[in-house]
Amino acid sequence: MDSDTTGLLEKLFPFTFTVDSDLLLSQVSPRLGDLCPAAVSGLDFMTVFRCHRPRTVSCYEELLAAENTLFLLISHDEQLALKGQMLLSADGKRLHFAGMPWLEWMNQKAPQVRLHLGDFPKLDSQMDRDFHLISQQSMVNELESLNEKLAKAERESRDSIKVQSELFAVMSHEMRTPLNGVISALSLLSEECSSAEREKITEVANESANNLLSVINYALDYSKIDAGKMPLQMLDFSLTRMLDSVIAVTEGRAKEKEIELSYFMASDVQKLVVGDEEKIRQVLINIVGNAIKFTEVGAVNVFVEQKENLFSFIITDTGVGIAKKDFPKLFNPFWGKTKSDSETSTGLGLNIVMRLVELMSGEVRFESEEGVGTNFRVEIPLEVGKLDSIPEKESAMDALPSTFSGRVLLVDDNQVNLMLGRMILENRGVSVRTASDGEEAVKTIKDVSFDLVLMDISMPVMDGVAAMQEINLLPSPPPVVALTANVGDDFAKRYFDAGFKGYLKKPLEQAAMVSELSFWLKPSTLDVAGAIVSGEMLFNSDVVEELIKQIGNENYLHVRSLFIDESQSRITSLSNAWLRRDLEKVRKEAHALSSSVASFGCEDLSWRLKKIEAAACLGDATEIVRYMTDIDSASKDALDIVLQYGESEEATNR
Amino acid sequence: MYGLIHAALRDLILEDHGVETWNQVVLQSGVPSNSFLTMRSYSDETTMALVDAASQVLMLPTNDCLQVFGHYWVARFAPKEYGGLLDHTGGSLIEFFQNLDALHDRLSTSFTEFKPPSFKVKINTANSAVIKYVSSRKGLTPFVIGIITGIGERFDTAIHIDAVDSSNSDQGEVSDILISMASNG
Ligand code: HEM
């Protein structure tokens, strides 16, 4: 082989040398010299390399015989392995070796030797294969991690389906119990019922319906928190006022069970804070409500402490306590829910407590001993308020007129809703027309002018949104407010986009309805400013009848005259006490009077006196003024009725 | 580009900024979640959508983002699985630069839809050189700069970018990157 050829060969193969018939090396390529310093011209081939293939080479003739086979050579220092071929020179006297690193061997046995891309012929695929293997491996890794993710997602979706269906079962159960209450109560209502029985039945139905509503509210809260749709509303508020309202909501139940209920605030607790008052209130009502539920004797107390920005609410009870084995399950949404006795279940409530507290970056813990009681500790970080006092929140209803004048079109396909809506509206002095679907509504609006249209969204024939489109085309369309069970920002936006001026949530709530009416309608001139509507009867004759039945007419007449005298003097002393601002006396007089007037059927008067008593307890002067203002005339009216009732009834019945 | 590049961007953000940030990037980019298979080639728009979203979420200009990414690619990502290949690319900094084309040539046999860049090195003095980068894509010069500084670290050498002269056309982008090198050892 001439030197040109050797040069070409070297370009194709970075590792070349020549061996003559005496097995002596020459023309060692530079890269070979670098990586195998023993490969020096003039040295014996056999002292530098051993042949891995062909196996049995000990002389030049054997090398020659293997000319067309694969050579795998390993340097005696084990630092280099080559793969290549021997080629006979043109004169037949020498063999030329042309080769490249044996990559597999090098990777395994001499990984420390740095090979370069240039060490390999361009056409050699060892490197490519190496790279390919790496890529394959990374794809396998990828596949494994995807598999893992898939398995995890599968597990999670299975778990979540399980959770959902358990929730569904629990909710159904929780809803069925109060619904059964409503149904059975209503089925007892019949013509033959006395009015006292009717009242009792209505009360049961009402209570069950409220229970049902609270379960549904739980479900809605639960799904709202779950979907992250319960943003925090950070506002200034008064801790005292918030706690008062927690107590006000729960004390009825505590009184029934004769359990003490109160709260204590450490003297260094800042009363004005910034936080989500509604959520904290909801949490406390829930825990206090539970504490009362599980306590038969003793007390439920709420203690409030503050350490820097961390406020702790500690709710203690002297109730049945929680069994140790139930500790881990306490906040589980389904715990206790499968028992048929709904009294023992706290499930969703406590779960929501935990979620709400977490939402406020707080913590809720508890300790409990069976038969001794339970302590819940809710810790919530709150900012200390910047305001000196919180402006008195006027209750929405207080500021609003109670009756209106105007014409309202009520549109709903459900006859019961139409009837209820009509009753509520007419009670408010409004004149009402009704329509059962969108088409009828549009037709009516074309004929008669209305001050306000209240329209259901989903209706047959023409739904609310379609009707709204037609109404928009009229020359002077009346304001239309949507009635809908779908609430939430998305829906609200959709309704406003369609041209509705507002929306009211179904089932209709008085307060929201009144506030909407007050926006669109004029207050009625008949409206007595600040009139107090107690919702109680001025006089309940059943109570007096019952009393007469128990003590006889003669005794009744006697007691009645004592009662009238006594009441009149107590009213005077109540008014005097109030003039002196002697709250303790006000409270006592109001308390004594409220129960005696109730025994003579003066329910409205009794209700007012209870309000006065509660306000006196809380030292709430505004509230006392509110109910004291017309107490004289109210009591005169009530006592007159008691007197008159006796007179006329005597003549006819006895 | 190949999913390998997307996966590298993902790992960079996951390692340095956390999973929340990464989720935000994916959401912002609108790129489907199955765009990260190493050996699958995705449209360059997909790649750029990820880069743009990352720059918005991290509030870094796109060029800075690309540079950080380039550095991460060669200093932290490629060595994890392709360390051997990087080792083979060169025993010295200059040799490494000279072998970049050979490296991408090798890759082309496995990545059949590969549209690799090309690099030529012109050595000015012992510590100064011009690297000519030719790409069929536009706007990736900052990525190259990030990679170049990362390669410097492999060889314990601080690389300073003295000048960048870029021009682009329908065919893509050509940049002459003038570097000076100072060995840290
Ligand atoms: C083991 C090492 C490497 C691997 C596995 C690799 C792989 C890849 C892959 C898969 C692409 C996508 C191209 C396409 O899909 O069409 C790419 C692009 C690119 N690579 Fe590499 N590469 C490596 C090392 C390097 C190095 C050391 C540089 C040095 C400058 C570099 C510079 C680039 C550039 C600039 C691009 C963008 C494409 C363009 O400019 O058009 N790569 N590489």
Image: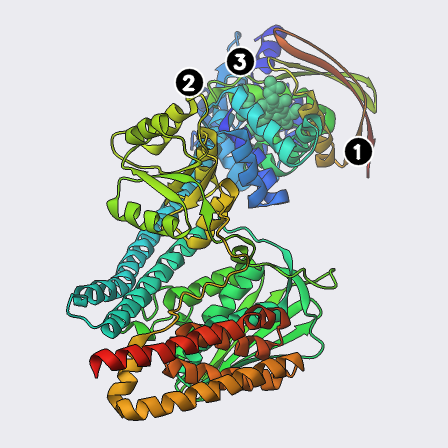
- Residue A118, horizontal then vertical, whole percent: 61, 22
Type of amino acid under label 2 = Asn
- Residue A21, horizontal then vertical, whole percent: 54, 20
Q: Residue at x 43, y 67 (%)?
A: A350
Which chain does tag 3 point to?
A: A
- Residue A320, horizontal then vertical, whole percent: 39, 84
Q: Are discs 2 and 3 less than 8 Å apart at CB?
A: no
Residue in the foreground of this view, choosing between A199 and B67: A199
What kind of element bears circle 1?
Answer: strand
Q: Quadrant of the C terminus of chain B?
A: top right
- Residue A115, horizontal then vertical, whole percent: 61, 30
Q: CA distance from mark 3 to mark 1?
A: 54 Å
Type of amino acid under label 3 = Lys
Q: Which residue is mark 3?
A: A93
Query: Does residue A151 lie above or below A494 as drawn?
Result: below
Q: Which residue is mark 2?
A: A68
Q: Residues within 10 Å of mark 2 (few under 14, many from 20)?
A: few
Q: Which residue is mark 1?
A: B158
Q: Is mark 1 within 8 Å of ligand 1?
A: no
Q: Residues within 10 Å of mark 1 (few under 14, many from 20)?
A: some
Q: Is mark 3 within 8 Å of ligand 1?
A: no
